[in-house]
Image: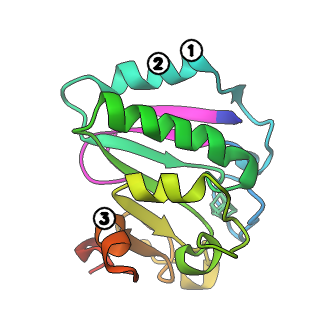
Amino acid sequence: MNIGEILTADCANGLGMRVSVFVSGCLNHCKGCFQPQTWEFDYGIPYDGAVEQKILDELAMPYYDGLTILGGEPFEIQNQETVAALIGRVKKELPARNIWMYTGYTYDRDLVPGGCRYTKFTDSILDQIDILVDGRFMEEKKNLCLKFRGSENQRIIDMRQTRAAGKVVLSPLNN
Ligand code: SF4
């Protein structure tokens, strides 16, 4: 996996102060995507142990609320193993930090058994994150007033409650 960028002290991609990691590669190709350079899987720099340690070290600073993983597309099949490993380390070493993820895929269609982006790593990822913002960016539903999402079809999903209930539970942040 490659990553395009690590944003530190980021307040735009989730609640509070965050480290945001933009992974490379996206096959959604949404019309109007604001960062089409991230569609290429070889965009940016290779993700390796040193990069992962840099993310963990930064996230350990006391002023951070959590980690956000976005892209690109973290749920492309070739990205999921590395994303799952990163999330596993964060939950083990920094359990107080919350984790948000962004995907252009639809949780209850594409990321469940039989879905087009369901792999042996998907449940491990979804079981450990707090918020998933899902859905393609749709230019015709673009709304600049929305917080944490670009178009009205996208959902801010409370993953803890969703996994416990077995059905999609939206975060109050959607309102
Ligand atoms: S999912 Fe995100 S990165 Fe991928 S094309 Fe859509 S807006 Fe762009």
Q: Is there CB contact under 8 Å for labels 1 and 2?
A: yes
- Count of marks placed on residues: 3
Residue 156 painted magenta: no
Q: Which residue is mark 2?
A: 54
Q: From the image, tell me which residue sits under label 1.
A: 50
Majority secondary structure of the magenta segment?
strand
Quadrant field for ligand 1 = bottom right
**How far is the residue under mark 2 from the one under mark 3?**
27 Å
Q: CA distance from mark 1 to mark 3?
A: 30 Å
Tell me the SS state at disc 1. Answer: helix
**Residue 9 lies within the magenta run:** yes
The residue mark sitting in front, 2 or 3, is 3
Helix, strand or loop for disc 3: helix
How far from the left and from the top, in percent, is residue 98? 29, 47
| CA gap, disc 1 and disc 2 | 6 Å
Q: Quadrant of the C terminus?
A: bottom left
For the N terminus, the quadrant is top right
Please give the name of the residue rendered at 66% of the width and 51% of the height, measured from the top-left corner. 72
Numbered circle sitting on residue 171: none
Q: Residue 151 at what x, y percent from top left? A: 51, 76
| Residue 160 numbered tag | 3
Q: Secondary structure at mark 2?
A: helix
